[in-house]
Amino acid sequence: MAALADNNSSTDAEPSGSQAVKALLRLREMVLAGELAGGSRIAEVAISEKLGVSRTPIRAALMRLEQEGLLELLPGGGYTVRTFSERDISEAIELRGTLEGLSARLAAEHGVPTLLLTEASACLDQIDAVLAHPALDDEAFSAYVRLNEHFHSLLSEMAGSAVIAKELERVVRLPFASPSGFVVAQANSGHARDMLVVAQDQHRQVLEAIGQREGSRAEAIMREHSRLAQRNLRAALTGTLEAMPAVRLIRKREFRARP
């Protein structure tokens, strides 16, 4: 117990904000990496000891992950790791497509500063450079993920809507709903680069539509863009993208029609 007390006292010396961020990032990683199995109850004390932070930031992290939809609050207190139906994930992806489509339409209708359009175009130039290689290694996939997320964040910024940006931030934290949710899992697929080339063409098209103030076209492209993730969801459930441990969080059930 003395060793544990010493450990807690050292971590308590860190700024509370630093502990909270550390706990949140590590807990989210543990869930998505499959270290905490779907349906399992979170042992707060054990997690505190494992991460080397006090229980206060652990509780804050658990509350945040429950808000993000990764954990479920139990009636008697405590949390379990959520599992998701195929429909849950599909609808989260559809919601992202709807929100990003709305963002693109608003950006086109309201107009975007030249500097922001230039930054987005430069980001796409960097993605082109990554995809120029006939075969992509792990480093290239990681670079694509970073640049892809940056481009999507720029699209959100172009809309100039704090409300939409907040909702997008929430939905992309759900497993597989982010723009790069399946990219790393595609690394071992022979068709991975082809899929990314298609996505990049859509990036170019939506940026062109926004620049030309074509709101309806920009919205339609982003809605179509999200369908690539829907295709990858089906691939994950058929076992062709099993590289992602978080796939285990999905309950592989058929969609049921609503009553």
Image (cartoon, grey):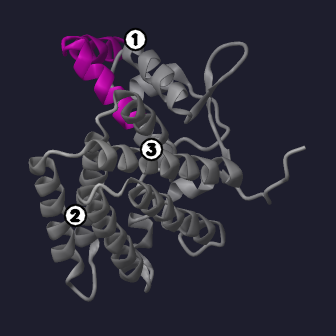
Mark 1 lies on residue? 56
Quadrant where the N terminus lies? Answer: top left
Say which amino acid is labelled 1: Thr
Mark 2 lies on residue? 143
Helix, strand or loop at label 2? It is helix
Is the residue 58 above or below the residue 183 in the image? above
Say which amino acid is labelled 3: Val
Which residue is nearer to you in this view: 200 or 106? 106
Is residue 97 in the magenta section? Answer: no
Q: Earlier in the sequence, mark 3 or mark 1?
A: 1
Is the residue marked by circle 1 packed among few (<14), some (14-19), or many (20+) residues within 10 Å? some
Q: Which of marks 2 and 1 is nearer the N terminus?
A: 1
- At a point 21% along the width and 15% down the height, the residue shown is 10
- At a point 40% along the width and 65% down the height, the residue shown is 183
Q: Nearer the viewer, mark 3 or mark 1?
A: 3
Say which amino acid is labelled 2: Ala
Magenta residue span: 1-27
Residue 65 image position (x, y, % from top left): 49, 29
Is the residue marked by circle 3 packed among few (<14), some (14-19), or many (20+) residues within 10 Å? some
- At a point 51% along the width and 21% down the height, the residue shown is 44
Residue 29 image position (x, y, % from top left): 41, 43
Is the residue 219 above or below the residue 69 in the image? below
Q: Can you see residue 34?
A: no
